[in-house]
Image (cartoon, rainbow, N blue to C red):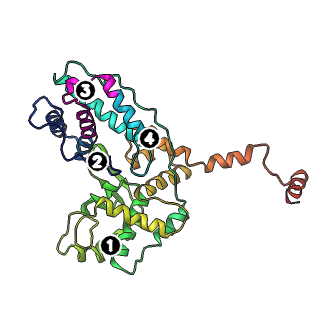
Amino acid sequence: MPRKRQPPAAIGNPNDPHGMGVLLDHFLEWLRIRNFSEHTVDHRRTYLGYFINWAEERGIVRPADVTKPILERFQRWLFHYRQRNGKPLSFRTQTHYLTSLRAWFKWLARQNHILYNPASELELPKLEHRLPKFVLTATEADVVMNQTNVATSLGVRDRAILETFYSTGMRRNELRQLNVCDVDVERGVVVVRQGKNKKDRTIPIGGRALLWMQKYQEQVRPGLSPGDAGGVLFLTEQGMPLTAYRLSQMVRRYVAAADLGKTGSCHLFRHTLATLMLENGADVRFVQAMLGHANLSTTQIYTHVSIRKLKQIHEATHPARLQRTDNAGAAEETLES
């Protein structure tokens, strides 16, 4: 199982109509017919492909042969598996494999390919609620922006990209798919089309980001894609849409060049936007709308990151704080001696 999970080359026996490989293809087609994103379909194929190959190595070739103990055995295998770097799979990654299994076997049972669903009572790992590792301050975000060489055309493009990430908090793929017509300069908004879960949303974009975006559109983009008045907004030197990998590498490079002692890529600005907005008094539901979160609980994680107000209350109310009194002065002298 490589670090970058790619679908196995061959999945199951294509000549067995009741085999796992053929039924997996039917399941993936069913997902596409019901308008699941290709991203979801690819991930289902990848995760289920590993289970199918694992099962066939142990002589299990049909879904009807799979029992709950077999699925629990696969779950233990995931737990003990070690990647090439020697690290185990995270519990979140293990959950991705197991939720794909539960979805597939639920479909198999409903389509009468199996008599019962052996995954219906499969217990998933308890996931940690982890905070973002790094968040930029407003000053640090400006330092990252200033790493771009705006005397060059690509530097202007990169500055516009960073400003857009910082101002809107949109996801990497949402920015990649942004079209010229999705930016409304007069209203100061941008339309995110077919974001996560295929949902559109309209969000505000700041004046500084709009200025850099206009500079890019007027001075740089015509040279990258002559005669193209529409289409994807941010382009490569060859006039092609940016790939997800290239976009991540570009942002990561600027963050590293800022030498802030922090690492991150596109999602770093998403964390930063949410945290800074909350610290400056934004209601969590407005931040939820900006980020396009389906559940408020996903946004509320940032309330634990934005502790500036909590720190102010702590300093104002905790009895162990230092005060400018005779006793506090004596304490300071004691600490210094």
State yes or no: residue 70 in magenta. Answer: yes
Specify the amino acid type for callout 1: Tyr
Residue at the spot 34% in from the left edge and 63% down from the top edge? 247
Dot 2: what SS?
Answer: loop
Q: Are marks 4 and 2 in contact (CB under 8 Å)?
A: no
Label 3 CA crowd tier, 10 Å (few <14, some 14–19, many 20+): some
Q: Which residues are magenta?
A: 48-71
Specify the amino acid type for callout 4: Thr
From the top left corner, tell me how far across and down residue 324 is, in percent.
84, 55
Q: Nearer the viewer, mark 4 or mark 2?
A: 4
The front one of 269 and 118 is 118
Of mark 3 and mark 1, the one earlier in the sequence is 3
Q: CA distance from mark 4 to mark 1?
A: 33 Å
Residue indicated by mark 3: 106
Residue indicated by mark 2: 200
Q: CA distance from mark 2 to mark 1?
A: 25 Å
From the top left corner, tell me how far across and down residue 242 is, in percent.
28, 64
| Tag shown at residue 216 | 1
Of mark 4 and mark 1, the one earlier in the sequence is 1
Q: CA distance from mark 3 to mark 2?
A: 29 Å
Label 2 CA crowd tier, 10 Å (few <14, some 14–19, many 20+): few
Of mark 2 and mark 1, the one earlier in the sequence is 2
Dot 3: what SS?
Answer: helix
| Tag shown at residue 298 | 4
Residue at the spot 49% in from the left edge and 60% down from the top edge? 263
Specify the amino acid type for callout 3: Lys
Q: CA distance from mark 4 to mark 3?
A: 26 Å
Of mark 4 and mark 3, the one earlier in the sequence is 3
Q: Is residue 259 left or right of residue 105?
A: right
- Above or below, comparing residue 204 to residue 93 in the picture: below
Residue at the spot 48% in from the left edge and 44% down from the top edge? 284
